[in-house]
Amino acid sequence: MTAVTRFQRLLVGIYPPSFRHRYGEELASLVEDNGSNWRDIVDLALGVCRAWMAPVFEGNPVAQRRSRLQATTITVLAAWCASLLAAAGFTKAVDDPPLRALHGAAGTAYDVGTVVVECTAAVVLLTGFAFWLVVTIPAFRARRRAVLAPALAPAVFVGAWLGVTGLVALFVHHNVPRAGIALTWPHGVVVLAVFLAWMAVTVVCVAGCAAGAVLALRRSQLGVTGLAASTVVAAGAAAAITAQALSSAVCLITLVRTAGIDGRDAVISAGSVALFVGATSVAAVSATRGLGALRSGPPAP
Amino acid sequence: MPRVADDPKWTDPGLLVLGSLAEGPKHGYAMVQDVEESTGVRLGPGTLYGAIARLEARGLIEALDGGDSRRRPYRLTARGVEVLEGQLAGMQRFAGLGRRRLARLTPAFGGTP
């Protein structure tokens, strides 16, 4: 198998699940019939983007509406997870340790963003727990391992993250003085490596929690009524992510204009704002489509 | 027939697919070959299945049951025939109008009226 063929198969594999379920085999067959060529790779890549931007759902109108609501819930959940990572990066850049210039307009914007992050996290986690019970209890009664395994995965990831974070905290307590540490070999570099490894574990755990929740939701075949409720929460989360993106952007712009942030922190916080903006765009588009399906769709069966 | 905003335009791969299926049911690879032979346009796999998905969601084409799931044939629905006829009629009117206007314009540039 050539590298081009492998790449073509990879592209077919990253189409939206609903598209892959309906057309995946045919698409893979057509790609094989066409043979390996770079023109098809470009066409497939554009097709993947179009399919994610404007997904088409199969089945009757009720099934299409259900798929739309499920897609909105899953997409906004993924965007919210990305926004959590962006919030962590932004906080690290401007508030760990706190910048001297983090007051006035910059401080207010940062505080607003922090409150929004915390309130949204509380609402999403409480709602997520309620949905977790709705999905898990029937699956437990019916012994549906296909649902139970991904539903329990977030607990495993959170446990692993808490364990790793505890070990890292112990390491920092014994190896890093309060005044901070210089990046010198070997002590400073080891501390940096531990911090980067902890960040990587955090990213993996957040992605694992999201993937488990998404798989459990998809396999549980939740009804339109439940998905309608999750879509409303998702729309609120999308609005909150937008507020976070705006507040972090205002904070960063104010800090840069007052020269209150150095180059490294500016790069980290700009990357975080870019991640916020990406998450906001995806979440807002998906939430708008989900709310549209709620308003215009047929009544729930 | 009322026009729908997202009806396939004449430049749209969707119209090429509808035109190909007007000959009879075809699977994806056969559509690609037919469109390329008849129009010179080569539809890539992503473009083709994006068009098929949109047309099927709008009820303009439908998959035929049975056979190889990797080479599932599609055919036009009654609504698809209606939309294709409407598009072709519009194109024919536009082509006729354009030709008549060009015929009046061409002498001004020294051509044959």
Image: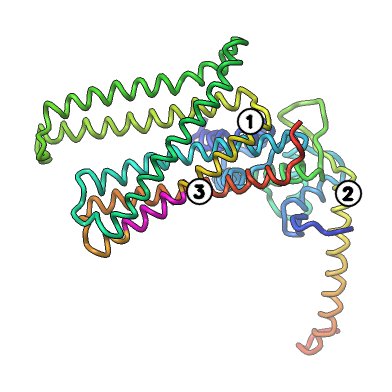
The reply to whether discs 3 and 2 touch (Cβ–Cβ < 8 Å) is no
Q: Nearer the viewer, mark 3 or mark 2?
A: 3
Q: How many marks?
A: 3
Q: Is residue A97 magenta?
A: no
In the image, which residues are magenta?
Answer: A242-252
The subunit letter for the residue under badge 1 reads A
Residue B41: x and y in percent read 70, 54
Identify the element where label 3 is drawn: helix
Find disc 3 in the rendering and name its residue. Answer: A239
The reply to whether discs 1 and 2 touch (Cβ–Cβ < 8 Å) is no
Q: Is residue A250 magenta?
A: yes
The reply to whether discs 3 and 1 touch (Cβ–Cβ < 8 Å) is no
For residue A29, side relative to residue A127 (left or right): right
Lower position in the chain sequence, tag 3 or tag 1: 1
Q: Amino acid at mark 3?
A: Ala
Where, quadrant-wise, is the C terminus of chain A in this rendering? top right
Residue displayed at 22% across by 43% down: A96
Instruction: Tell me how far mark 1 sits from mark 2, CA to CA.
Output: 39 Å
**Quarter of the image where one finds residue A48:** top right
* Residue B81, numbered label: 2
Q: Is residue A8 above or below residue A251?
A: above
For residue B1, side relative to residue A34 (left or right): right
Mark 3: give few (<14), some (14-19) or many (20+) Cα within 10 Å.
some
Which residue is at the front of the view, B30 or A156?
A156
Residue A29: x and y in percent read 66, 32
The subunit letter for the residue under badge 3 reads A
Find disc 1 in the rendering and name its residue. Answer: A226
Instruction: Tell me how far mark 3 sits from mark 1, CA to CA.
Output: 20 Å
